Amino acid sequence: MQLSGLFVGLTTIDIHYRVDTFPASNAKTVAGAFAMAVGGPATNAAITFAHLGAKSHLLSVIGQHPFTSFIKDELHQYHVEVTDLSPAAIQLPTVSSIVTTYGGHRAVITTRSSPTSSMNDAVFITHHEDYDVVLVDGFSMDTCCTVAQQARQCGIPVVLDAGSWKKGMERLLPYIDIAICSEQFQTPNGSDQESIMAYLTDQGVSYRVITRGERPILYRTPNDNGEIAIEDVEVVDTLGAGDVLHGAFCYYYAKDHQFVPALLYASQVATLSCQTFGTRSWMS
């Protein structure tokens, strides 16, 4: 039977340029490569999950605006089913412009856009067999909390993409089974590794992970702790690598609930994604 995952969170537009060096003030630079793609933590994870061969369902605010058809067409292209959490919204999505130089160094300019869900109390999960795994990214926090609670009640594992602390996250954490944090993640108790691990433990999160770029991934389980080394490769672009890791982890974990192997395989997929430009080239 095909695996199925539910992904809840942000959808963005990523406009991406690759240049030899960052532009100087008042200078015009011609990009060596260009890509425009749908982005966002939950969205990129959902696309990765589908690419690996599973059935992917995204809950996200899309709305009605000039980017709507572009977003829906790309999600369809990558076999991601989408439920628009606010179909009447007319506010533009978050749009990010990313400039990347060789070696994966980048600068990002992004808009502040946070269209809200109009389906915070909807029922998306009613049975254990509805999905094999759920991922939430903390955007559309009320909906993330609702879905995570429904998944917990049905015995479906819930994964948190903890790229950064978001308002209301203390309401979400009691329903999280696995938290995958970036090294920039900050808790109310601090941002060092021990503070993050301890805080998540206190909130009832059984499996805790901190990713650290090219340095080894740190993890703790109820019975063990350890590191996963990252393969040394020539990095072209790191945009979306964390999202790819989360989507790949969901896929491999959903297969047999083997935490450490799933994290290892996911890190290998994320490393592969860093060797090509943009968030989709690695798929070919």
Image (cartoon, rainbow, N blue to C red):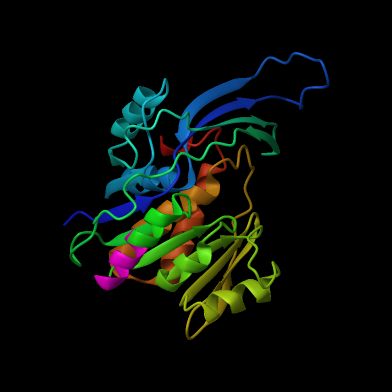
- The residue nearer to you, when weighing 22 against 268, is 22
Q: Quadrant of the C terminus?
A: top left
Q: Position of residue 20 (x, y in %)?
A: 73, 25
Report whether residue 280 is seen.
Answer: no
Report whether residue 112 is seen.
Answer: yes
- The residue nearer to you, when weighing 49 against 177, is 177
Q: Position of residue 173 (x, y in %)?
A: 47, 69
Task: Check if residue 87 falls in the magenta segment.
Answer: no
- The residue nearer to you, when weighing 206 against 260, is 206
Q: Main secondary structure of the magenta part?
A: helix
- The residue nearer to you, when weighing 201 against 54, is 201
Q: Quadrant of residue 152?
A: bottom left
- The residue drawn where x is 29% and y is 47% is 56
State which region is magenta.
147-155
**Count of labels shown?**
0
Q: Quadrant of residue 219?
A: bottom right
Task: Check if residue 153 falls in the magenta segment.
Answer: yes
